[in-house]
Image (tube, helix red, strand yellow):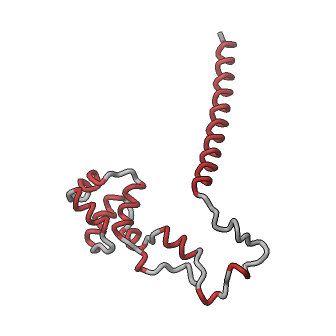
Amino acid sequence: METNKISTDKIHHGRNIKRVRESKGIKQDVMANMVSLSQQSVSRYECQKEIDDETLQKFADALGVTADMLKEMPDPMCIIIENNTFENNDNVSIDNLGEDYDKENSYNFNPIDKVVELYERLLKAEQEKNTTLEDRLSKIEEKLKEKK
């Protein structure tokens, strides 16, 4: 299976505009003002699979990206699915994946557990940062007291 090349049927211009717009924190009504359209028109464009080059260029300019990026950016979910799917001609079954493959736990992946794990790691890093900053602050306060 060739996973380096994403077919054009998995590319959705409107979703790409929406993804870039949301990643930049721009609301639809603000986007509408930027491209001189109504909010409803922006919403309709974001639902369209293919958008003409001229309109796509307007959105690209407003978002600060290239039109080619909006044209060629595949849906990330399609990439994940394509990279993790076996084709029929691979002759792969659960029974011949090897000793390391755990049938019972292979599909028990819980994304919430990963989010919690990430949150805990971020919280710990934030606590360490706060402790370091408090130490620095106390040292600065001590130096200021010594100077007085």
Identify whether 23 is placed above or below 119: below
Q: Is residue 20 above or below residue 139?
A: below
Q: Can you give x and y, in whole percent of width and height, for residue 35 in the image?
A: 25, 59
Q: Quadrant of the C terminus?
A: top right
Report the residue at 72% width, 80% height from top.
95
Residue at the limit of the structure toward the top, as seen here: 148
Residue projecting furthest to the right? 99
Residue in the picture at 23% in, 53% down: 33
Up/down of 115 relative to 51, above or below: above
Total marks placed: 0
Which quadrant holds residue 71? bottom left
Residue 25 is left or right of residue 58, and the answer is right
| Residue appearing at x 62%, y 41% in the figure | 123
Residue 88 place in picture, x, y as percent: 59, 87
With 6 as the anchor, is 43 left or right in this view? Answer: left
Q: Residue at the bottom extreme?
A: 89
- Residue 78 image position (x, y, % from top left): 49, 72
Q: Residue at x 26, y 61 (%)?
A: 42
Of 70 and 83, nearer the camera is 83
In what quadrant of the picture does the N terminus appear?
bottom right
Counting from the top left corner in percent of width and height, residue 48 is at 30, 70
Quadrant in the picture for residue 67:
bottom left
Q: Nearer the viewer, residue 77 or 110?
A: 110
